[in-house]
Image (tube, rainbow, N blue to C red):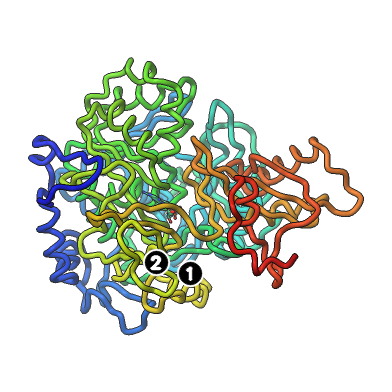
Amino acid sequence: MSAKLSGDVYYPSEEVLSKAHIKNWDELSKKATEDYEGFWEERANELNWFKKWDKVIDDSNKPFYKWFTGAQTNISYNCLDRHVKTERRNKLALIWEGENGDFETMSYYRLHKETCKFANILKSMGVEKGDRVTIYMGRTPEIVIAMLACARVGAIHSVVYGGFSVEALHERIEDSQSKVLIVSDGAYQRGKIVPLKEIADEALQRAGGIEHVIVIKRTGQDVNMEFGRDMWYHELANLPIANQSCALEIMDAEDPLFILYTSGTTGKPKAILHTHGGYQVGTYTTLKYVFDIHEEDRYWCAADPGWITGHSYIVYGPLLNGATSFLYEGAPNYPYPNRWWSMIENYGINILYTAPTAIRGLMRFGDAWINRHDLSSLKLLGSVGEPINPEAWKWYHKVVGNEKCPIMDTWWQTETGMFMITPMPCVPLKPGTGTRPFPGIEMDILDDDGKPVGANEEGYLVIKTPWPSMIRTIYGDPDRYVNQYWSKYPGVYLTGDSAKRDEDGYIWVIGRVDDVIKVSGYRLGTAEIESALVSHQAVAEAAAIGIPDDVKGNVIYSYVILRAGVEGTDELKEELRQHVGYEVGPIAKPASVKFVEKLPKTRSGKIMRRVLKAEEMGEDPGNLSTLED
Ligand code: PRX
């Protein structure tokens, strides 16, 4: 970009430019725009395929787009087998540190073997291509191995974030109709053990369908093992079935790789489906170009494998690139606020990818914790999950990155599978924007009638071109896929976010315009929180909204109508908070519970959350013509 940009701009340094894979964004963008299919075909050719495609994009049944149709592949081959055949076989694929100080490294060679072992165990349990396997674990190497093993045998993994709890897990097991559950006994978090197996036992009492439970020993406390159903992984791994070589399943490019549940506009969480072929091309390419992956890098994405960021950029993207990835089990400030910085120093991590909430949380502790550590290994930083406020951006840039690390503010979603609005190291940055769409991808900001809004005007953020790692459908509910994403503006993908575009074409994402609340970057639906509240015997009706918060981005406020005769005490408020924590997970606990007599509703009975929010924030509630009363 040659013209001078407006506002607060950070231009790339000569040093950054000299090393970058992509030195000229405009050139790449022009190439990708002029021959979109050719661009992605070239990227796909960097990976291995057992059979090449007949077509790059098949749009004969929109919006059910297909990519690389006719091709055969298996993402686990590209993550492992491909590297094991080269000098990368001895390279570290994973460096892991447990919160309690445990430590492990794993070469590509060993990760391949461990994956084969796990895959053979799955096979011995009768897991076949297309079967669903639920994974519920903390951040340890075994979660990566379990995911790759599923991919290897053609099973569809459904990872449930280890911070979710009983009802969230139950719902996801049941909806996916998984027949195997992989769980660890527990996970260390802030010095305590999260009893994952115990939570899973409770969820399994509510859910049917699971035939086998594979239990991985991590924390070592006594857990209930149900005879005939539950088996220790380390015992299975010593049996002859756990052979270290395992032929992989040949997958069509469009065969499912995983489902991942995420909160949507209404109702239950939905299972976003991704496939082997397009997903590998999208995640491989975006990580390579945006985080500028080189052989010598030690890359750390501090997300959890249980969310899309972990799927795409802890597990698949880095392994597809043959990168060395760091994984950390626990809390950022345990036992002290320098934990992250000491690990960056110890392991010489040079790329750090995290969320604004973590940055703001660590910023709170002051610079002294960080200044005690030598972070000179860092060359690149990343941000994801919610808009980053310029103050946090600048702290991240100055104090963490020592003013030499460009910040890749990447906007994307569970549904997009890969970065969609993102800079690259060669792109001039402005704090608070992910700059422009990835080369070739067309995005826009529309008003209610579908007309593009003017510069600096707010509107609905949409995507106009298909992309390789796009959501294929909502598993088991294709109508909902069409309704939710493709019906407001036919032929155009609705992101659910609002945004503005400035005079330089940079997109500034503002936030969700639907009933999704981002708490510490985690995506929650008002419906999940409300149904957890209503499942308590004292509650007749409930509403939940997000209220802005300096550290977490948003916190949850809830409004509860009690059943007749129940007294609204402070103890009950706390009990309701704990109840939501138990049912959905600690991240979903409301910061505030208020007892009310009535909830604002439309005449058709829909809760008007914006009225609650306006009242809470002392703002004008806007148009109230649809309010029932
Ligand atoms: O609102 C946007 C916000 O996170 C939503 C997607 O959440 P999820 O599917 O959980 O995926 C999060 C990680 C990819 C988006 O609709 N979001 C994500 N990244 C950004 C963001 N908002 C602003 N800036 C970002 N960089």
**Secondary structure type for disc 1:** loop
How many C-alpha atoms fall within 10 Å of the one at disc 1: few (<14), some, or many (≥20)?
many
Residue 433 % position (x, y) = 31, 48
Question: What is the spatial separation of the Cα atoms under label 1 and label 2, in whole angstroms?
Answer: 8 Å
- Residue 469 as seen in the image, left or right of residue 52: right
- Residue 456 as seen in the image, left or right of residue 235: left
Near-viewer residue (143 or 123): 143
Among the 4 quarters of the image, the one containing residue 104: top left
Numbered mark located on residue 471 in the image = 2
Residue tagged 1: 474
**Please, what is the three-letter code of the amino acid marked with disc 1?**
Ile
Residue 567 % position (x, y) = 87, 44
Numbered mark located on residue 17 in the image = none
Residue 214 % position (x, y) = 54, 49
Q: Looking at this rendering, what residue extends furthest in the bottom direction?
A: 60
**Secondary structure type for disc 2:** loop
Q: Are marks 1 and 2 in contact (CB under 8 Å)?
A: yes
Residue occupying image coordinates x 51% and y 77%: 479
Question: As displayed, is residue 580 above or below residue 336?
Answer: below
How many C-alpha atoms fall within 10 Å of the one at disc 2: few (<14), some, or many (≥20)?
many
Near-viewer residue (445 or 183): 445
Residue occupying image coordinates x 70% and y 64%: 601
Residue 587 % position (x, y) = 58, 42
Near-viewer residue (596 or 422): 596
Q: For the C terminus, which image quadrant? A: bottom right
**Please, what is the three-letter code of the amino acid marked with disc 2?**
Ile
Q: Is residue 356 visible?
A: yes
Residue occupying image coordinates x 24% and y 30%: 378
Label 2 CB sits under 8 Å from any ligand 1 atom: no
Near-viewer residue (329 or 153): 329
